[in-house]
Image (spheres, grey):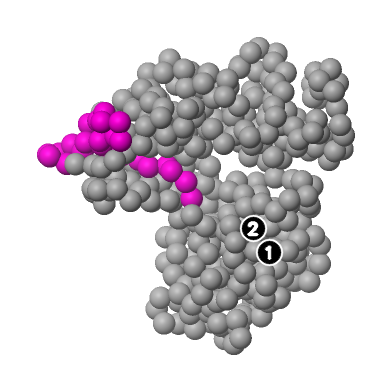
Amino acid sequence: MTHEYIIIGGGPTGASAIEGIRAHDKEGRILVLSRENSPPYQRPPLSKDLWFGKTTLDKLPVHDDAYYRDNHVELALRREVVEIDPEKKQVWDDRNTMYEYGKLLIATGGYPRRMNVEGSDHESIRYFRSLEDYQFLRERADRIHHVLVLGAGFIGMELAAALRHAGREVTLVYPEQHPLSRVLPRDLGLFVADYYRQHGIEAVSGEKVARFESPGEEIVAYMQSGNSVTTQLVIAGIGLEPATDLADAAGLQVNKGIEVDEMARTSDPNIYAAGDVAEFPCIPLEQRLRMEHWDHALMHGKAAGANMAGANQPYTHLPMFFSDLFDLGWEAVGAVESHLDTHAVWKQEHREGIVYYLWDDVIQGVLLWNTWGAVDWARELIAKKQVMTREEREALKPPA
């Protein structure tokens, strides 16, 4: 049977693509092929709200079962797509089943980046991405007293806080000078490291694992410096590799991700890509990006679905992202990248305020640090592309 629309990937991008399609085509058959065990669910709570009692597992699904039924969506779980044939407009799964499509969306997201050091295949070394990873970690956390977290990006920092909140001893090891080094300016990053230490986390900068050994029930991580950490469980959050293998094999253009235009079309006009796996033109910032954030996954997926159904509407959204670090919370919009010039305006230093990210005195990104309700204001500020003096930036006031 031919499906007008096939979506490869059962994450938030694929789920929101259904909404985009149905906004413009109420009848075309939709098939979602997902390697997950569960229907599309929200990922941010896996390292945030579930640990702090702010939500529950039953609230994770993006849509309830009735949504797929009412919208005539066939949801095929535990299906790994192994081949795309653009010429014949066919995809094949790992059960040797072939499906024909009219339009195809690749929303495969990515895989956790893996370590390549001696002993890194030990069963007590885990990566974190899925609901199954959360369930494993939650169950193990109740039976151990110490966890080694590797990496101080979003996942590493959030899981370190979550596990400490759950009463575990936590050692956090990262190779950079400070946590979230790609996002936070140095002074703020160093403050966060000290803040974690105040919460009982051993935060160790400038270290990388050289090898693992397991002399007994525990596992020992030996660092390149010669130091070592003995633990019961290692959680590695060292980045994401976009799942571009299908696109590569199909002959699509791939760079940092699957290359798409402003409509989310790949180099094949019948194949689209969106979310974590896609490199897209960010129209508000006038640059090509690959972005791994929830808001982008939802909005890019919806735009891709709409364009698959003939909307012909460019993706003009400027994504935001957010994180929670104990009782430090923040939202960010635009190019929030530490290599840019920054200008912080604090209400309370390192506790509440706004950090502007600048290129030639033009605001490219805004970090709202414990400052809420100002995301749209930040988007409007970036959209102005206005050269501003330091005094003018300090005079800016977000909505009360």
What residue sits 57% from the left and 76% below the top?
251
CA gap, disc 2 and disc 1:
6 Å
- Tell me if residue 10 can be seen: no
- Tell me if residue 89 can be seen: yes
Disc 2 target residue: 279
Q: Viewer-proximal residue, 391 or 58? A: 391
As helix, strand or loop, the secondary structure at mark 2 comes to: strand
Image quadrant containing the N terminus: bottom right
Q: How many marks?
A: 2
Tag 2 near tag 1, CB within 8 Å: yes
Please give left or right for residue 73 compared with residue 218 in the image.
right
Dot 2: few (<14), some (14–19), or many (≥20) neighbours within 10 Å?
A: many
Please give left or right for residue 112 compared with residue 232 in the image.
right
Question: What type is the residue that disc 2 sits on?
Answer: Glu
Disc 1 target residue: 260
Please tell me whether residue 228 belongs to the stretch shown in magenta. Answer: yes
What residue sits 87% from the left and 34% below the top?
386
Could you tell me residue 268's position as x and y percent? Answer: 67, 76
**Magenta residues (range):** 214-240
Q: Viewer-proximal residue, 117 or 132? A: 117
81 up-or-down from 37: above or below: below
